[in-house]
Image (spheres, helix red, strand yellow):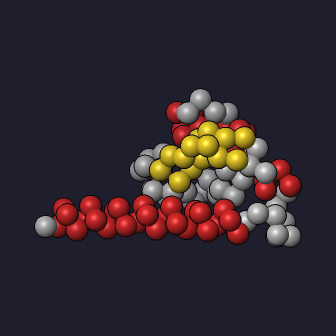
Amino acid sequence: MAHQTSNALFKLALVFTLVFMIISTAESVNRGMGFKKQDADAVCNSVHGQVSGETCTSVAQDFSLSLEDFLAINPNINCDSVFVGQWLCVDGSA
């Protein structure tokens, strides 16, 4: 029973993270909040849910991206505070 509860909570956390990411992305479109024009133009075609132990650098390497390209398609990411389940863009254009 504890395993089922834990699994359900993990799935709920992933759904919450996805909803939060969608809302954050929609609200971050250049609204005079200091985002550069290129940040507002970033397009994401595929995402990856971060797992324990991953970093921005390791995710970029796993998906054959330079760190610069990874950061360009994830313009609002703070690599010092990524969390398990956070959706990271791994294919897109800036």
Quarter of the image with the N terminus is bottom left
Residue 56 showing in the rendered view? no
| Residue 66 position (above or below residue 32) | above
Residue 42 showing in the rendered view? yes
Seen as rendered, the residue at the extreme left is 1
Q: Residue at x 52, y 66 (%)?
A: 19
Of the pair 91 and 65, the residue shown nearer to us: 91
Residue 85 in the image: state x and y as whole percent: 45, 56
Of the pair 6 and 41, the residue shown nearer to us: 41
| Residue 45 position (above or below residue 12) | above
Quarter of the image with the C terminus is top right
| Residue 64 position (above or below residue 76) | above
**Side of 10 where 19 appears, left or right:** right
Residue 78 in the image: state x and y as whole percent: 64, 57
| Residue 79 position (above or below residue 2) | above
Residue 6 in the image: state x and y as whole percent: 25, 65
Seen as rendered, the residue at the extreme top is 64
Q: Residue at x 72, y 53 (%)?
A: 75
* Total number of numbered discs in the rendering: 0
Hey, which quadrant is residue 2 in on the image? bottom left
**Side of 6 where 72 appears, left or right:** right
Residue 52 in the image: state x and y as whole percent: 41, 50
Q: Residue at x 61, y 43 (%)?
A: 45
